Image: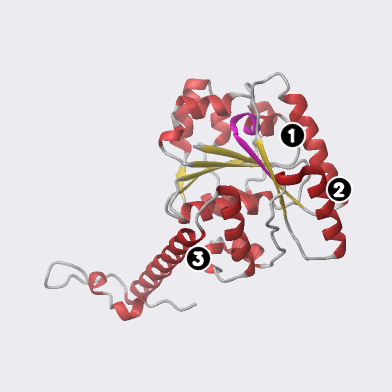
Amino acid sequence: MRTIAVVNYKGGVGKTVFSICIAQALAITGYRVLTIDNDCQHNLSLVLGEGTFPRDIRAVYQNSVGNAGMMMLQAIRETRLRNLHVLTSNAELCNADVKDPQILRKAMSYCSLSRFYDYVIIDNHPGLDVLQETAVDAADELFIPTELSHFALSGINELNGLIASRFRNRDKKHLIRIIPNFYKGTKRQDAYLEQLRAEYGKCVTATTLPYDSVFEACMKDRKTLFINHLFSKAAAYYLKLIHELFDLSEEETWEHVQKTRKEAITNTAREHYYETLGKPKVTSDGGTEEDQFPDEMMSVED
């Protein structure tokens, strides 16, 4: 199981959208994925979990190690996408909830989370306080989405300094990947991108994520980028990015995504069809009219 914390010292760099999109892409490809909302703004919970719930990440932090592990398993919820689960957050989440900065890692180990998931993606709010420290401690890898601006670059430097000082005395080394986000191809952005690669070398992904209004539409309508907007520029670059970050086969990934998309659209069409007709009637062979749904109505066109 690979555990990834999505962090940045600065806000507004697209961490939550990034967390959602890579989690959805991995789930569609067939991997078992858990997303953890470690942010009091709980936007990831609203999009994937469709709300907040009494049992959530805050309840995990407030329990002892053994109980935290059991609470974690009880609090995990399914999403509308197969293979993708979520551990939600709420507006009351705060640093005071964390009594032990290593509780998240301990709880994950105690409940043997690796038996159930291939990837864990932890979304965080800006900064590096106690809440983010628990996520960094639990993670094997740190993904840092960033804007290409002066303040964003200085934020990465501050984040690296804080991580180095906080984990100096721990036997913990992280694989760090920096992902340029909101790329528009301007000369100023290209200059910052060149500076970023000069300072951090191979830690910076070769793939840059473009600015695209489709992201806002996906989050607002709770849509899945790779199902509802597969042929958008945003989806193309995200698929390219997950090949780079997770070393996945491009052909196999594309086949999985197309298959999942077709199934999702087919199911939506079937549900809409029977909502229009009303409850399916029982047929002479003991099945229902739903079983007799005509194949020609299942065709999908983009």
Colour scheme of the rendered structure: secondary structure
Vertical position of residue 16 compared to residue 141: above or below: below
Q: For the magenta stretch, what is the residue range?
A: 135-143
Badges 3 and 1: C-beta atoms under 8 Å apart?
A: no
Vertical position of residue 51 compared to residue 182: above or below: above
Quarter assignment of residue 262: bottom left
Label located before the other in sequence (2 or 1) = 1
Q: Which residue is mark 2?
A: 151
The one nearer the camera, 29 or 228, is 29
Residue drawn 64% across the image and 63% down it: 215
Residue drawn 67% across the image and 20% down it: 170
Q: Which residue is mark 3?
A: 227
Q: Secondary structure at mark 2?
A: helix
Which percent across, then down, holds residue 40? Answer: 66, 41
Residue drawn 71% across the image and 45% down it: 202
Label located before the other in sequence (2 or 3) = 2
Q: Amino acid at mark 2?
A: Phe
Residue most toward the left?
284
Q: Amino acid at mark 1?
A: Leu
Q: Which residue is mark 1?
A: 128
